[in-house]
Image (spheres, grey):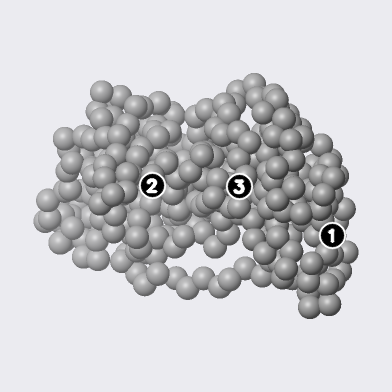
Amino acid sequence: MRSTCLVAALAGLAYAAPRPSPQLINFEEIDSADAPLVTGPAPGAVSEPVTYNEQQAKAQAIAETTEDLSTPAKRSLVDRGVDDPCSPQPDGYGPKPPVDSDAAFLAYQLFHDTANNAPTPQGYQRSFVDKQASSSGNGYMGLYTLKTYDTIKCQQLCDAANLCTAFNIYFERDPVFAPADACPKPDAFTNIKCTLWGSPVTPETATNKGQYRRDFHVVIAGSNGYTKNNPPDAQPGFTGPTEFGGAINAPNSYIGQKFFPGVYDAGKCSGACTATTAYNKRHPRADQTYDACNFYNVYLLSRNNIPEGTYCSLYTKAWGKSYSTNYGQFRGSDSMTVSSSYGFTLAPQDSGHI
């Protein structure tokens, strides 16, 4: 994966070139990043346990950062399973409308009342309510099917999953059999689904309105999204997190950036920071000095209020909140915004001398 501006192919050229400032969002870095292959539950899925591993993600971040302008790695599609034709599907526990049709499902008043009256868990804010679409995006982590429309249970599942930032709960019209040529339009039942996310859910992420499975129309109702406001976890070897307003826009000491699509994870920036120092230390200047990453700014980058992933800006010295003045920028008609911005400072500091 390309690591633009983070390290250079030739150390001498890197040190001779002026350091980029101010620290605008690097769109080339974003465009070159591999988007997550999975952005929501598979059609027909009733359970997809959370498999995100922070240590593996950090190790991958270190490896990607160390790659200097290398060719993007090829990724194979993930086999998520295929239902046998006309096989019975796990029974749903949700209420059924009196008429079995997609229109009746979407109009069923009980779904609307349940969503609008659902309690907001402590420590969360409701991002959207009673939509006829579920969330879809880069930060998808996993899926659970519930026996009741229980926002507290869904919140507990999110809290039990490391780095879970938000959840989406909704009613889904599903077929009793896996649709196939021999059973193209089975009867319907109702599943109550709880999906977990490693980035905020917003009205703009609620884009999955269902799909056709043969002649059966999967639709969604009573979809509520909830996001918690909490800082990222502390990182070994660094002090912080220090909360900022926008992203850091410092007058000097900036040595590059890295972007990771998907789950918002400060550990990836920690890995990028340490990998950058290690690389630069192996390629010092003639006077045996090198640029050490002593501070990084991590934030969630969103496009038109839809989370894209974790953005890391790296520095040789620490900066305070007064320099966190970059709240985003436009790219054509797209609004690229900064949120959940925090700083981490290496302790002890690296002198940058061999």
Which residue is drawn at the image coordinates 32% and 44% (left, top)? 335
Crowding at dot 3, Cα within 10 Å, few <14 / some 14-19 / many 20+, comes out as many
Residue corresponding to mark 2? 303
The residue at the point 70 percent across, 42 percent down is 107
Q: Nearer the viewer, residue 179 or 195?
A: 179
Q: Earlier in the sequence, mark 1 or mark 2?
A: 1
Residue 16 horizontal side relative to residue 145, left or right: left
- The dot on residue 187 is 1
Which marked residue is nearer to the observer: mark 1 or mark 2? 1
Three-letter code, disc 3: Ala
Residue 43 against residue 118 in the figure, above or below? below
Q: Quadrant of residue 15?
A: bottom left
Hey, what amino acid is under mark 2? Arg
Q: In the rendering, at what x and y percent does residue 58 appear?
A: 50, 50
Residue under numbered circle 3 = 133
Image location of residue 168, percent across then percent down: 64, 40
